Image (tube, rainbow, N blue to C red):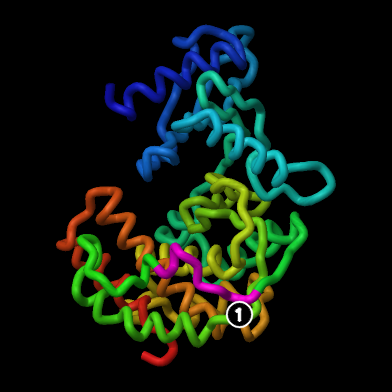
């Protein structure tokens, strides 16, 4: 059965079991379908059940994950981000269900930050500063650590010399400079944080109370620059800054780093992380999601992001 059809049926049964009523009592509308790798596929739905006594309807959001482990992981992250004693950063979780691999959560009212940018509902620099401030608050929720930058096996595989089916020649030609940049950056001090893991403007909602985030990756300590670079890559792909060319606009990077409160040293290392994120996204698009080398506009923008400082 098609995912877009089967997931609402699963969600209605889950909601009836956890929140009451019958499956047919629940009205469901898709918020987002996220077909990434098999292990991380998920569907978000807005759910509504009328009150039979005439009161206000019960409204919430539900996510059906691919695995129970993914549901439990994301529920834990939502709980940590909406715990009492600090401003909430995410929707409040209502339940997690291992059997259905589902999560119930508060329904956020408002557009995603990506949609708000597209509609002109928020000024661009203000949006980027707000996103940076939200990320800084998330990273501050857990103790930070530091370590020297050591390009590991994943980075080495990404920058490997051999040809790859997913890597067109234009990317291949950039690899020597990127490998030199990786060696030059070796030993630079990195701040490690509990990262969002999939930080971009479609995973932030602009509510009346400020930004709220969702769709967290598994809890992992990663360089803070990985979250920042992913946000800039995806923002540039979806909502490029007018008149700024193909790559990440310096004004965008400056506004995001200003909101985050990053030191000047962070901006110097950001270019290398932008290159890695751009390569990773192209590999995901072609190798895992079935994109093609003919995705010319995407390829051109990503290629413009793979320029290390020396290039």
Query: Badge 1 local density, few (<14 within 10 Å), some, or many (20+)?
Result: some
- Magenta includes 155? yes
Name the spot of residue 303 as percent of width and height, x first. Answer: 30, 75
Residue at coordinates 44% horizontally, 32% vertically from top-left?
A: 66
Picture quadrant where residue 129 is located: bottom right
Name the spot of residue 118 as percent of width and height, x first. Answer: 40, 60
Front-most of residues 65 and 255: 65
Against 166, residue 149 (above or below) is: below
Residue at coordinates 62% horizontally, 34% vertically from top-left?
A: 106
**Mark 1 falls on what kind of element?**
helix
Residue at coordinates 22% horizontally, 77% vertically from top-left?
A: 170
Name the spot of residue 278 as percent of width and height, x first. Answer: 38, 68
Give left or right: position of 310 versus 113.
left
Residue at coordinates 53% horizontally, 36% vertically from top-left?
A: 70
Against 263, residue 154 (above or below) is: above
Quarter that holds the C terminus:
bottom left
Against 57, residue 238 (above or below) is: below
In the picture of the structure, the residue carrying the numbered disc 1 is 266
Give left or right: position of 107 versus 92.
left
- Magenta includes 128? no
Which region of the structure is painted magenta? 148-156
Name the spot of residue 148 as percent of width and height, x first. Answer: 63, 76
Picture quadrant where residue 299 is located: bottom left
């Amino acid at each position: 059965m098609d995912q877009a059809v089967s997931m609402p049926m699963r969600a209605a049964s889950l909601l009836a079991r956890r929140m009451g009523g019958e499956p047919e009592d629940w009205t469901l509308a898709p918020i987002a379908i996220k077909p990434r790798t098999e292990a991380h596929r998920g569907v978000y739905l807005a759910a509504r059940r009328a009150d039979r006594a005439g009161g206000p309807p019960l409204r919430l959001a539900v996510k059906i994950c691919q695995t129970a482990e993914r549901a439990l992981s994301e529920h834990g992250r939502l709980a940590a981000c909406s715990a009492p004693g600090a401003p909430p950063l995410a929707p409040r979780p209502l339940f997690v269900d291992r059997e259905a691999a589902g999560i119930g959560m508060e329904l956020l009212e408002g557009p995603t930050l990506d949609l708000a940018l597209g509609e002109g509902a928020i000024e661009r620099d203000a949006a980027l500063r707000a996103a940076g401030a939200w990320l800084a608050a998330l990273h501050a929720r857990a103790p930070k650590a530091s370590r020297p930058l050591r390009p590991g096996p994943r980075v080495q595989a990404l920058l490997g010399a051999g040809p790859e089916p997913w890597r067109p020649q234009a990317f291949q030609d950039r690899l020597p400079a990127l490998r030199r940049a990786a060696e030059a950056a070796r030993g630079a001090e990195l701040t490690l944080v509990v990262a969002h893991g999939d930080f971009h403007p479609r995973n932030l909602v602009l509510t009346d109370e400020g930004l709220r985030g969702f769709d967290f990756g598994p809890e992992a300590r990663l360089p803070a620059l990985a979250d920042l670079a992913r946000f800039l890559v995806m923002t540039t792909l979806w909502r490029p800054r007018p008149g700024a060319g193909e790559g990440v606009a310096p004004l965008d990077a400056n506004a995001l780093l200003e909101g985050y409160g990053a030191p000047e040293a962070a901006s110097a290392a950001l270019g290398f992380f932008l290159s890695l994120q751009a390569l990773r996204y192209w590999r995901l698009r072609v190798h895992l999601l079935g994109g093609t080398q003919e995705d010319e506009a995407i390829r051109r923008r990503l290629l413009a992001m793979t320029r290390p400082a020396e290039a």
